[in-house]
Amino acid sequence: MFDANRFFKDRFSAHLKETSRYLKYIFNGHIAVAMLFLVSALSFYYQQWLETIPDTFPTALIIGLGFGFMASYSPVRTLLREPDLVFLLPAEFKMGTYFRNALIYSFVIQLYLILLVAAALGPLYLASYPNEPGSKYLLIVVVLFILKVWNLLANWWMLKIRDWKTRWTDQVIRFLLNAVIFFFFIQGQLLLAAVTTLILFVLFVYNYYLSKQHSGLVWDVLVDKDRMRMRTFYRIANMFTDVPHLKMQIKKRHWLVSIIARNVRFKQEASYVYLYRITMIRSGDYLGMYIRLMVIGGLAVYYVPNIWMKLIFTFLFLYLSSFQMMTIWQHHRTVTWLDLYPIPKESRQDAVLGLLKQLMIIQTIVFALLFLYIGNLTGVVVVSLGGLMFSYLFVHGYVKQRLT
């Protein structure tokens, strides 16, 4: 006898075991300390900025868009896998309890995002509307929870529609309506908020009507969406530890490869230098992660007013970038033909160390130029000398010991 409730518990237990296995590496000591410092610093300057916030700042629009996105973005985690397309299809009419539990699970795991966004935007609301009671903001958060449930159900109903354009259009319309509701609510225009809520409710009824026109589930869409979410999680985890079953995407980027490989000598000892350079450009998410961290660090350096905090952020992001790039050493771990190269292992280590050092030096130059742009000559000198010294010590003192 097929027990849908028991089956969901087994699938949930396996999913929890799989994710917790990688989460302990993501939130290791290095990253936890760096993130704690980053959040603390941002909170400090965020509070300082709120003390000088102008009266014309579009607080209602910002909170409306933030809460509207949080309400409309309500993915359903079904925990389905590819073999389910064959083995569970005959039991579809018995899966009601399973999908009910999946909806509850999807709502619960998204609560922390709502709480984070509400906690982040709460001080902005109180600073912009000092005459409004704090209970009004709590009421807005309660409305967010209610609309979250509505949107989660609407997303589930629309997953019976195979046409992605229809689902995407519905998602955009609901996002706009959710954002408008919160905007009017914050502005105190309750009548307009009520009218918009009624329009949104009519859209939900239409979503339900569309779902009833399709009696069966689109199993391949459900499986594909869960597979893509797990792939995203694995890609994040792969920045911190080895994920053996992650399928890497290869991007050609011919023009960029030709630029970085142009100066590589056509000699045997340069084989690994060429290999890891094109791996950096074409494989996985190394290039994107490197650029994103450099951009975020640059924004922090540019907008943080205190010179010492600017320098701390500079070296923090220099460390984070190089620490994440270390995983490139394990990228070709399953490629056995590398062991056939008539090249000593030290040559491979030197290639990775050289690549990491070059990336750190490039980032140091970018940060130094940013200090030069904002007219801080002290920062230029400290970042230039300190960045070069830190790059050498980190690569030869820390990374080299871990390349085994």
Image (cartoon, grey):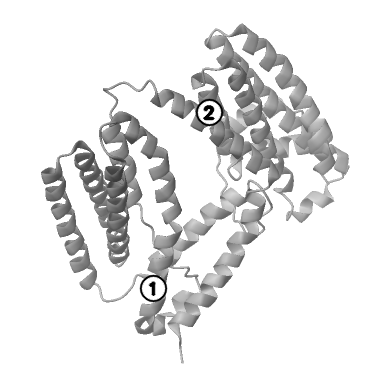
Q: Is 20 positioned to the left or the right of 11 in the image?
A: right
Sooner in the amino-acid sequence: mark 2 or mark 1:
1
Frontmost residue, 263 versus 389: 389
Residue 47 point in image, percent of width and height: 45, 28
* Residue 281 visible in rendering: no
Residue 165 point in image, percent of width and height: 28, 54
Frontmost residue, 209 versus 383: 383
Q: Residue at x 31, y 38 (%)?
A: 63
Q: Is 16 positioned to the left or the right of 221 in the image?
A: right
Q: Is 376 positioned to the left or the right of 348 in the image?
A: left
Q: Residue at x 45, y 24 (%)?
A: 48
Count of marks placed on residues: 2
Separation of marks 2 and 1 at Cα, in angstroms: 41 Å
| SS type, badge 1 | helix
| SS type, badge 2 | helix
Mark 2 is surrounded, within 10 Å at the Cα level, by few (under 14), some (14 to 19) or many (20 or more) other residues, namely: some
Numbered label attached to residue 295: 2
Numbered label attached to residue 99: 1
Q: Is 55 positioned to the left or the right of 91 in the image?
A: left
Question: Is 232 drawn above or below residue 312 in the view shown?
Answer: below
Question: Is 223 drawn above or below residue 291 in the view shown?
Answer: below
Q: Are marks 2 and 1 in contact (CB under 8 Å)?
A: no
Q: Amino acid at mark 1?
A: Phe
Frontmost residue, 252 versus 367: 367
Residue 142 point in image, percent of width and height: 30, 53
Q: Residue at x 32, y 60 (%)?
A: 152
Q: Amino acid at mark 2?
A: Val
Residue 372 point in image, percent of width and height: 57, 10
Question: Is 10 drawn above or below residue 59 in the view shown?
Answer: below
Q: Residue at x 55, y 30 (%)?
A: 41
